[in-house]
Amino acid sequence: MHEDEGQPGRRGSVIRDPGEIASLPRAELAVLRPVLEEFEFRVSRYYASLVQWDDPADPLRRLVLPHRSELEDDFPYDASDEAANTQVRGLQHKYPRTALLLLTEVCASYCRFCFRKRFTLATGDEHHIAPADSRETRLDVAAGLDYIRRHTEIDNVLLTGGDPLMLSARRIADVLRQICEVPHVRTIRIGTKVPAFDPDRLTEELLCAFDDVRSTGRRVVVVAHFNHSRELTAKALDKVELLLSRGVSLVNQTPVLRGVNDDVTELVRLLGGLAEAGVIPYYLFQCRPVHGNESFMLPIQDTLHLIGQARAQLNGLARRFRYVASHAAGKIEVLGLYEDRLAFRFHEARDPADEGRLFTMPADAPVHWPEPPAVMGDARCDQDR
């Protein structure tokens, strides 16, 4: 692992044992132990200071504190079939123009709804992969870049993990430099929750690394993960402003999560606050059906209703997001509800033949995940079988 690398004095910046949290009711600790045998707990001290630990309904607490419901569903660990997109260790290529480099399995804190918990939160039992044994992340990007060089259709690279900003600024700068040597890559995206979880990691040294990318004529886009408006603290917003002042673009994506942001007022505060800060609301996601996530999932019908009410209270800048599900077949946009049908469209597709394809599903019962027809044809009939 490469957490806090090159960050003097930061070794004590993370809490890994819920027992260290004095305001967490002691009666809860015994309930948490079986969950901790399956999935790790990790929270930055900065983020811990924002959580109301004595309030079971606190949305930030729900986001990071283990809960026994994580053991109660039988969803798969790789609901989006990322294994099928892995071309070499540490590189995924699902959509023609975008490659993902997975640099680390570590995050500043661990979200309980993580869709990659098979190698981030995993504690190494027989059910999933221990982080140290993961074949999905790789700090050495040589093999991944060799693949990208041979695929000239790739014009943007997304650094992800885990959280790539858990690496030292020196290592990040080295990765960025190597990517910039590939002439057909014009945009580098960085998927990170560091601005919300640990904004002090956004150092001047890191900003200088972004400056170096910009000096080559390439664009740096930080894909942030603000899930709740209380994460938009003065410190976080100061770092957002600093990134913007250095020519870095910022967008945000978040799932809609039961008990975290499934409230019209909260969605308005979050999306409106992001837009006001200069962060483009990019995606609202349907929570993926990954093992341990059932308690976070809302029916698509309910989420559509929430989003519709929130949109009515947002200006145009805050309405630019799409509501999508990251399905194994592609990013599927949820278009809306018409009479007794849910309507969907492939926003991006693994199979080019699916690009832009529309399909519907019955809405007479709660739908938690879209299931597109396997073949072209009458989607209505396919979904009714």
Image (spheres, rainbow, N blue to C red):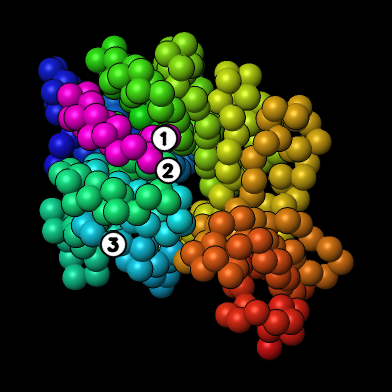
Horizontal side of 234 relative to 207 (left or right) equals right
Numbered range of the magenta stretch: 167-190
Residue that protrudes farthest toward the bottom in the picture: 385
Looking at the figure, which quarter contains the N terminus?
Answer: top left
Quickly name the residue at label 1.
186
- Name the residue nearer the viewer: 341 or 87: 87
| Secondary structure category for the residue under label 2 | loop
Which residue is the extreme one toward the right?
Answer: 339
Q: Which residue is mark 3?
A: 87
Q: Nearer the viewer, mark 3 or mark 2?
A: 2
Looking at the rendered structure, which numbered label has been put on residue 155? 2
Classify mark 2: residues with Cα within 10 Å, few (<14), some (14-19) or many (20+): some
Please say if 37 is above or below 204: below
Q: Position of residue 271 (x, y in %)?
A: 63, 31
**CB within 8 Å, label 3 to label 2:** no
| Residue 328 visible to the viewer | yes
Kind of residue at disc 1: Arg
For the residues marked 1 and 3, what is the alpha-carbon distance in whole angstroms? 21 Å
Residue 9's x, y, as percent?
14, 17
